[in-house]
Image: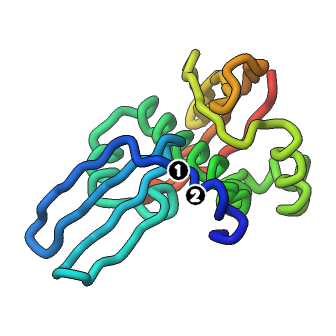
Amino acid sequence: YIENKKEDLLSTTLTKWQIKNYEDYTQYVCMDDKGRYYIFRETSPMQYTLLLDTYTIDIPEFIEKYDSCNVQERVALNIEKIKQALNSGDYRYVYSKLADSFKNNKYKTEQEFENYIKGALYNNIDIEYKNFSNEGETYIYDVEIKNLENEEDTIISMQIIMQLKEDRDFVMSFSVI
């Protein structure tokens, strides 16, 4: 991953940071110019762990926010996880979140899915949330996907269909409108 992203990471600039002191550690949250988060947890001087993403690990702040918000906000938070994974090139994570029936009908392998995404979406995306609806326990968000690297590129309209599972898990499918 690092080798594939080396040039991108070297040209990154930190734009925001936050320091939070907890009982057992100090947490430094940094955000770069492409919206990626880097979380450092320091337990003592020079003793730290680094979280390179916030979509595979639910940090306490995310859990608290997720558990206290409504269904529409939960779906949006999950879509943000997908956006972060796509912007990081983590197609395996996104593929793991696809509903089995959707995978079986559209992308039988992870490689097929990755090839589709690389051809259909931009390398660095932002998502604008439009209409939200539901059909029973299935939630539908109409979104617009923009290229963060070139604002003049075509906006892609997409419908994201999601089912919420236990313990902040979810499955999803999508359609390009």
Question: Residue flagged by tag 1: what amino acid is it?
Answer: Thr
Q: Amino acid at mark 2?
A: Leu
Q: Quadrant of residue 111?
A: bottom right
Q: How far is disc 2 from disc 1 in space, using C-alphas?
A: 5 Å
Q: Position of residue 51 (x, y in %)?
A: 42, 67
Pointer 2: what residue?
Answer: 9
Say what secondary structure mark 2 lies in. Answer: helix
Label 1: which residue? 12
Q: Residue at x 44, y 64 (%)?
A: 57
Quadrant for the C terminus, please: top right
Place of residue 3 in the rendered image (x, y in percent of width and height, measured from the top left): 69, 71
Q: Measured along the vertical axis of the image, is residue 5 above or below residue 86?
A: below
Asked if the residue under mark 1 is in contact with the one under mark 2, i.e. CB atoms within 8 Å, the reply is: yes
150 left or right of 39 in image: right
Pick out the residue farthest to the left.
23
Q: Nearer the viewer, residue 33 or 162?
A: 33
Left or right placement of residue 10 versus residue 39 in this view: right
Residue 23, placed above or below residue 91: below
Quadrant of image for the N terminus = bottom right
Residue 155 is tagged as none
Residue for point 60% across, 26% down? 141
Classify mark 2: residues with Cα within 10 Å, few (<14), some (14-19) or many (20+). Answer: few
